[in-house]
Amino acid sequence: MFAAVLDTCVLWPSLQRDFLLSLAIEGLYRPLWSEAILEELQRHEQLKLVDRGIGETDAAAKADFLLDQMRSAFGDAIVHDWEALEGSFGLPDIDDEHVLAAAVVGGAGAIVTENFKDFPSDAVPSTIQIISARHFAADAVDVNPASALRALRQLSSRHTRTPHTPAEILDILVARYGMNEVDEILRPLVD
């Protein structure tokens, strides 16, 4: 199965993360990440919740719960023993070396990120594609639209606090994350 490292920047927006992981649950790809990526996600999620008025203790608990859920649902997503490669690629931002190291060790075919400047093609092995979340999602949806539709419907069914239909989720994915291609493929199946 095709494996892709999900960079923190594509995991942090909640709905985008949930959609990408819903596609993985349907078997459209295998997500990969390192503990370093999850630690970054935990920090950003906690700060976001504090900014929204949640106390620090509750924000930390909610962020920890998110990571526990991700670890539980994707037990094989953690890439181990990448540390020996960290710092060996010459990336412009040394803080992104762990992402590429995890991709190499994990056998990923792609790194899903929005930070293209941090992964120049001359520093990334040719076997690893650097791709945006919107293009990656479109590629995954295009492989099996029926499975992607199931993922969208399951995501919709989990939205109980603030209910969203599959069509409304597509609207949000387009408006917030530019997932126009995903919408073009799935909208005819939803309506």
Image (cartoon, helix red, strand yellow):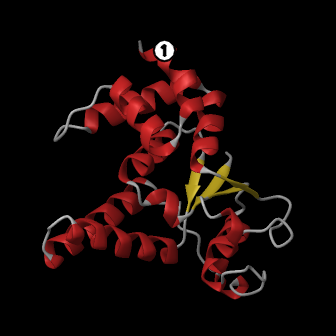
Query: Does 141 appear above or below 133?
Result: above
Query: Does 69 appear above or below 82?
Result: above
Residue at (50%, 78%) from the top-left corner? 36
Along the viewing direction, whichever of 84 and 130 lies nearer the viewer = 130
Q: Position of residue 1 (x, y in %)?
A: 67, 45
Query: Does 191 appear above or below 165?
Result: above
Query: Does 32 appear above or below 28?
Result: below
Along the viewing direction, whichever of 88 and 94 lies nearer the viewer = 94
Quadrant holding the C terminus: top left
Q: Which residue is mark 1?
A: 189
Residue at (50%, 72%) from the top-left corner? 37
Q: Position of residue 122 (x, y in %)?
A: 86, 70
Q: Position of residue 83 (x, y in %)?
A: 64, 85
How crowded pointer 1 is (Cα within 10 Å; few <14, some 14-19, many 20+) is rated as few
> Which of the 4 image quarters holds residue 64?
bottom left
Residue at (59%, 75%) from the top-left corner? 80
Q: Is residue 140 left or right of residue 57?
A: right
Secondary structure under the numbered disc 1 in the rendered image: helix
